[in-house]
Amino acid sequence: MSTFNPSKIRKEVEEFTPGRPEKFQDLVAAKDVIAELRKKRASHRSIAELLTRHCLPISKSSVAQFCHKVLGEKVRPYRRPSRQPAPVAETETAVQVETSPVPVPPTEASPSPGSAGDAPPATRPHGPRIAQIRMLKPQSQTT
């Protein structure tokens, strides 16, 4: 068995150079091409398709990672579009006002609010419907 020789190890340490990660090894040759395409605002998908057509099969996510890590591009966070209601035109609001049902005041002939055949009011507040327990009839227990 050979003995430990520190001079051999020091020589190898001096010559050691870390390699690129395996998945970027192929893209290093095309670094200038990718950088030029990105300056022309080419998408990662179009760059991946172009490189695939020229015998360098690569995915768009690998191109994106290469651009962020090697070329130093900033990563833009995904922004979900806001959920604002669409603006209503003035003509639509006028039509809605004219066609909206007119509330009729309750008469003696109409059923009371707690009756079983009661329909919901024509205009009700927005939001969830919450049961009003005081208006429910007690259930009869059958034995």
Image (tube, rainbow, N blue to C red):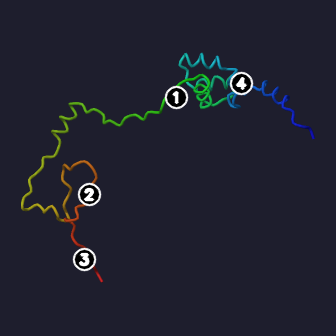
N-terminal of the two: label 2 or label 4?
Answer: 4
Q: CA distance from mark 4 to mark 1?
A: 28 Å
Residue at the limit of the structure toward the left, as seen here: 108
Q: CA distance from mark 3 to mark 4?
A: 80 Å
N-terminal of the two: label 4 or label 1?
Answer: 4
Amino acid at circle 1: Val
Residue 115 image position (x, y, % from top left): 17, 65
Q: Nearer the viewer, mark 3 or mark 2?
A: 2
Q: Which residue is mark 1?
A: 75
Amino acid at circle 2: Ile
Q: Which residue is mark 3?
A: 140
Residue 54 to residue 129: above or below: above
Task: Look at the numbered disc 3 and give the secondary structure of its residue.
Answer: loop
Q: CA distance from mark 2 to mark 1?
A: 45 Å
Q: Residue at x 65, y 20 (%)?
A: 31
Q: Quadrant of residue 22?
A: top right
N-terminal of the two: label 3 or label 2?
Answer: 2
Q: CA distance from mark 1 to mark 3?
A: 65 Å
Task: Look at the numbered disc 4 and give the secondary structure of its residue.
Answer: loop
Q: CA distance from mark 2 to mark 4?
A: 64 Å
Amino acid at circle 3: Ser
Q: Nearer the viewer, mark 1 or mark 3?
A: 1
Q: Which residue is mark 4?
A: 55
Q: Quadrant of the N terminus?
A: top right
Q: Nearer the viewer, mark 2 or mark 1?
A: 1
Residue 89 image position (x, y, % from top left): 24, 31
Q: Nearer the viewer, mark 4 or mark 1?
A: 1
